[in-house]
Image: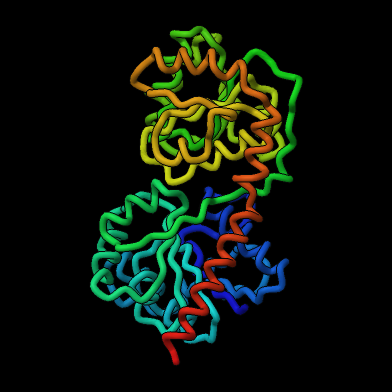
Amino acid sequence: MKIGFVCHDAFPIAQPFQGGLEMITYLLVEELVCRGHEVVSLCLEGSELAGEMIFYTKNELPHDFDSQELNSLKCISYSLNNFLLQDFDVVQNHSLHYQSILMGNISAHNFITTFHTPVFPYLKLAIEAVSANINQTFVGVSKCTANLYQKTLPLVHTVYNGIDVNQWNYNYNSTENYYSWSGRICKEKGLAQLMELCLLENINLKFAGPISEPSYFKEKVEPNLKYDNFEYVGHLKQPQLNDLIGKSKAFMFSSVWDEPYGLVIAEALASGVPVLANNVGAAPEILNADTGCLFNLQKPETFRKCIETIQHISRKDCRMRAEIFCCHKRMVDDYEKLYKRNSESFLVKAI
């Protein structure tokens, strides 16, 4: 198949990845090329993707508007228009830009849009605009995400995200006296609330990740570092993060928003580590009784119960869950099935 990928227009798709969306796009493209597909990606300059890359136009066009947002929209529209003039068997949209949904809907292609986020206002604008005459397929990265979008759209398929499990070493035996946490340090990740629970239970927490909201870190997180229970180890590269998680008693997931998937949960399971997760978003879809425990961040007694429960969870079961459910090759299998099914339906429509 010749597959077109519309990538995120805000960040290059290259390591170290800016976030989960960039990592997922990279793994998808790499695996599809390995399987013999011809992949052409519309992406930002600086991206490092397998297959052919076409870069978004950024500075080549004259800036006719006083608004930076309008000039950016002009460049995005120009890039998308030229890209969609090519001949593809399927176009996979992993951009977060509303214009890709609008232009994909009127293109002649078998067009698939994957939602990686909650329903932000600009995405809601786009899906409401196309809802009366849908000419593309929509996918959510979890059932939770699909259900959010199905409040506006009639059908949203689910293809779970995945990670390269083989990049994560697992540790079945050697653990140290601490729990682990990783992610962007910002309000929606709930780290400060988690630290309060850890103090109540007098347990140790080592946490890693970029400080994406400095005011939140300074006001809510940093004051807790005076306690011996906590250690901030910085923004770690993958091997160091793997080591941090793998040696911990368990991994803690504390997001307070409807996390579309929760890649850090998959990474912890791949490290052979059980997970305690705030019961939001896709966490209950990734975890089962053999691999983790769900709690309510607002109810300390549920957290306490989870601390007791995870002592009896097999680390081998955690790794096995990652290999079966969280593997990126399973994700690509599911997308290939969708591509094939859609292509057959697309051909029937064209006859």
Residue 156: x and y in percent read 38, 60
Q: Relative to the observer, which residue lies in front, 6 or 275?
A: 275
Quarter of the image for the C terminus: give it.
bottom left
Residue 221: x and y in percent read 43, 22
Residue at image position (56%, 73%) is 340
Q: Relative to the observer, which residue lies in front, 9 or 260?
A: 260
Vertical placement of residue 209 versus 349, above or below: above
**In the displayed structure, does residue 186 sit left or right of residue 249?**
left
Residue at image position (47%, 75%) is 57
The scheme the figure's colours follow is rainbow
User: Would residue 235 be seen by someone viewing this image from the given angle?
Assistant: yes
Residue at image position (35%, 49%) is 118
> How many numbered callouts?
0
**In the displayed structure, does residue 220 sit left or right of residue 229?**
left
Vertical placement of residue 7 versus 243, above or below: below
**In the displayed structure, does residue 97 sit left or right of residue 45?**
left
User: Would residue 214 be seen by someone viewing this image from the given angle?
Assistant: no
Residue 116: x and y in percent read 44, 53
Image quarter for residue 264? top right
Residue 89: x and y in percent read 55, 80
Q: Relative to the observer, which residue lies in front, 255 or 273?
A: 273
**In the displayed structure, does residue 120 sit left or right of residue 173?**
left
Q: Residue furthest bottom?
A: 351
Image quarter for residue 150? bottom left
Residue at image position (55%, 60%) is 12
Quarter of the image for the N terminus: give it.
bottom right
